[in-house]
Image (tube, grey):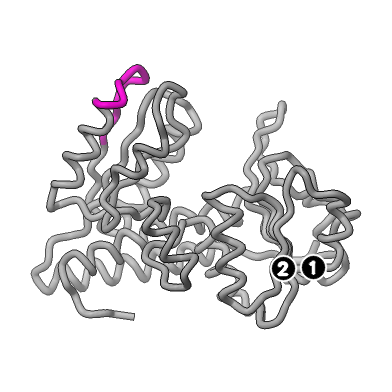
Amino acid sequence: MTESNLLDGKGIALKVREQVRQQVEKRVAQGHRAPGLATVLVGEDPASQVYVRNKHRAAEKAGIVNFHKELPADISQQGLLQVIDELNNDDAVDGILCQLPLPKHLDEDAVIMAIDPQKDVDGFHPQSTSALYQGKPNFVPCTPKGCMVLLDEAGIDLNGKNAVVVGRSHIVGKPMAHLLLGANCTVTICHSRTQDLASHTRKADVVVAAVGRSEMLTDEHISEGTVVIDVGINRGEDGKLRGDVDFAKVSPVAKAITPVPGGVGPMTIAMLMYNTCLAHQRRLGIEDES
């Protein structure tokens, strides 16, 4: 690996977050209230607690007001939906994020459906996904959007390129494929039933790994000159974070590659700040500032 082929998600995320901070500062100076982001955390899952704390810190630095709801793990479905309804009706809240996964007795789909689409800064509501698939995005899911911004900021030309997305989740894989398609890529989606995965990934100009299996993709899967985006975050027995890509083996052959940590993760949080700022803009009827 050389520094020249490392895609610095941390640095690009700081740039995006600074742009959001400046927009918020400008709006407040014009007499508008600051944007509000509500986070809902059910239970005491350590990883979820860390993710929510990181989002709170990023929001605070951007001038976004935090509205946090910490709920017991045994809360009923109705109790959780009531909290969501209260946040939907709170005019100071522009974005609502319910940290996933939820305890198994709760219906995640019903919770996502309950969030006001105009406050759906995660981009998971069916109205958001439908708009994305029609090429008229409302809120784009933060991780795929972050990947696209990272590629753009790094000057990666996607027009006409072959892209392979490994993983077909509603949160990352499928929206990622649609965004790449919108950027004029020819897109292949691979998954657990794909036969001879390497035969697909070796033909790709861009590979996005989003399967949640530690170091699943090796140099056998990647051809020289490929751009590799590693969405995976897996904690090994040694406590260290690893991606879905074997970084040590793949980085010498990749044209560009994201590290784990420090690649896609910071971009996800940056895009949450961006989406919250966008929701605030729309809800207050502020003219397009882009």
78 horizontally vs 246: left or right: left
Whole-percent x, y for residue 218 in the image = 85, 50
Is residue 120 among what the camera can see? yes
Q: Which residues are magenta?
A: 69-78
Q: Residues within 10 Å of mark 2 (few under 14, many from 20)?
A: many
Badge count? 2
Which quarter of the figure is the N terminus placed in? Answer: bottom right
Q: CA distance from mark 1 to mark 2?
A: 5 Å
Closer-to-camera residue (107/261): 107
Residue at 46 percent across and 23 percent down: it is 104
Residue at 83 percent across and 56 percent down: it is 250
Q: Which residue is mark 1?
A: 204
Q: Residue type at mark 1: give it.
A: Ala
Is residue 5 among what the camera can see? no
On screen, residue 182 above or below 254: below
Q: Which residue is mark 2?
A: 163
Whole-percent x, y for residue 219 in the image = 88, 55
Q: Residue type at mark 2: give it.
A: Ala
Whole-percent x, y for residue 66 in the image = 25, 46
Instruction: Give the quarter of the image for residue 54.
Output: top left
Whole-percent x, y for residue 111 in the image = 34, 38
Which one is earlier in the sequence, the residue at label 1 or at label 2? 2
99 horizontally vs 202: left or right: left
